[in-house]
Image (tube, rainbow, N blue to C red):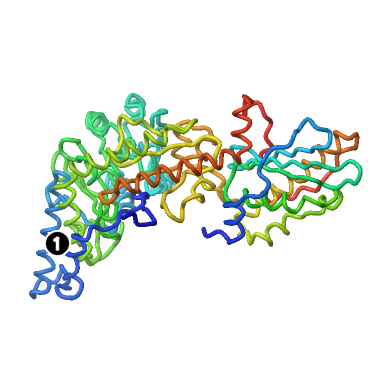
Amino acid sequence: MLKLPIYLDNNATTPMDPRVLETMIPYFTQHFGNAASRNHPFGWEAEEAVDYAREQVAKLIGADPKEIIFTSGATEGDNLGIKGVYEMYASKGNHIITATTEHKAVLDTCKHIEKLGGEVTYLEVKENGLIDLAELEAAIKPTTILVSIMYANNEIGVVQPIREIATIAKKHGVLFFTDATQAVGKIPVDVNKDGIDLMTFTGHKMYGPKGIGALYVRRKNPRVKVTAQMDGGGHERGMRSGTLNVPGIVGFGKACELCRLEMDEDAKRISVLRDKLETELMKLEEAYINGTPEHRLPHVTNISFKHVEGEGLLMGFNKNIALSSGSACTSASLEPSYVLKALGLGDDLAHSSLRFGLSRFTTEEEVDYTIKAISETVLKLRDMSPLWEMYKEGIDLNSIEWAHH
Amino acid sequence: MAYSEKVIDHYSNPKNVGTLDKASKNVGTGLVGAPECGDVMRLQIEVDDATGVIKDAKFKTFGCGSAIASSSLATEWLKGKTVDQAIAIDNMDIVEELNLPPVKIHCSVLAEDAIKAAINDYRVKNGLEQLVFEEKGVH
């Protein structure tokens, strides 16, 4: 039985797995202790639960539990990881290298650092969404302390060459931080095999609760430290103060465990559905996949339908299908997605894009419904589009002098 | 963002989608906006020579739901009006009728611009001079 509305915006957030919720519930009312209360059973229980979850989280990414710093989520992890390194390693240098397609939490953190006197290099990406490794290496200077490149992109799902990036960073004695929010739990991530020094990720993108995430901070080869960004009781080895969110941590741990056990099968099944969705939608004329399909998360696709506008397109079915568009058509921001523009897409294609994020819970029926609804809407809007009519008449749209407003 | 009932209605059942013969002397065509900005409107009017009344109006729009609704509504309003009456259509009338939120006012401005561009195209074709309109400057 198809149940509407269909949720295909799993890059924004995933539904929580009921098995995760189940493990969390006792930690609200029954085992409600403060994990830092060292002298009574309520505290001990909470601490034990946190320790167990820390192991579950560490195991998913091949880390040591001591290397896991719990945070409120990926944004906090980005801030703590980048600002924390910037402050801690100030005596070594002030230069950070990142890329233009990073999440705003990284880009805005870098802008903040520039205001503080730091220097940031923003690498462009190639048409396929990947950074150029030679460019990365060339950008490293004696003052470079950190390379911050995301594992997988939130809009187009492309997976960066993480191991190669790590090798280059290591060769030059530079720390490597990665925002792995979209990747952890979806594809195998191993901090040792991958050569990652710091990594942020979060519960709610992997069927866990919102408001809980982790920053991985390497303890050996090299031993990495970050300056705390919040003052207080010195929790999490002094790197992140604040009473631990025990139910959240328990849920996050469970979510990590489920992903570790089920990731391979999930990915196999979901990628079949994603491929079906993509293949069918690509049968429409003038449809384009954004970002390289060769290095991509198994559950993501981003497609532009030329000559229809993304927001108008969404309106055709957004009562029944939850998706997001790279187009923001408001007077405050007529700018389409900066990620798509960074790939070199013209504004027209960037305005015409839809982002699909499937999940563990996506069914084939939902995919079939989506294919039909989107295909129909694209055709309907093209019948209504002056650009489509001109294209069909063979008029070169670039030859027209548009009145830019 | 939630759309108003009227926007949804025009989006779902747009009135007067289509194309008039732009080579015809009686047809005025206005093409406004730009693909880079995420909206392009083409609005056409067909004027009765004898009476100066707009007999038919058609549109095609690339844009969001509010842009489609604004142009659909504009064609409805144009039909049956004289060219002089049509000049008086104000974007704020469209905003009011469709309950457009502030971030979508530019859609109504675009529709007004399209009406004026179509009227001017018609005037030039018929040996009249172009009217000069004041810039709205909202978009």
Q: Position of residue A194 (x, y in %)?
A: 19, 36
Q: Is residue B11 left or right of residue A245?
A: right
Q: Residue furthest front?
A: A1
User: Which chain hosts label 1?
Assistant: A
**Among the 4 quarters of the image, the one containing residue A293:** top left
Q: Is residue A189 visible?
A: yes
Q: Residue at x 63, y 59 (%)?
A: B100
| Residue annotated with mark 1 | A50
Q: Quadrant of residue A270?
A: top left
**Residue name at image x 39 percent, y 33 percent:** A291
Which of the 4 image quarters holds residue A48? bottom left
Using a 10 Å C-alpha cutoff, classify the residue at mark 1 as few (fewer than 14 neighbours), some (14 to 19) or many (20 or more).
many
Q: Position of residue A64 (x, y in %)?
A: 12, 48
Is residue A145 visible from the viewing direction of this image?
no
**A13 vs A374: above or below:** below
Looking at the image, which residue is at 42% across and 28% down? A127
Q: How many marks?
A: 1
Secondary element at image label 1 = helix
- Position of B44 with respect to A78 (left or right) is right
Which residue is rendered at x = 30% and y = 42% of the image?
A299
Q: In the displayed structure, would residue A397 be above or below residue B118?
A: above
Q: Nearer the viewer, residue A106 or A305?
A: A305
Q: Nearer the viewer, residue A307 or B37?
A: A307
Residue A76 point in image, percent of width and height = 32, 54
- Looking at the figure, which quarter contains the N terminus of chain A? bottom left
Split into 4 quadrants, where in the image is the C terminus of chain A?
A: top right
Q: Amino acid at mark 1?
A: Val
Q: Position of residue B57 (x, y in %)?
A: 74, 45
* Depth order, front residue of A116/A154: A154
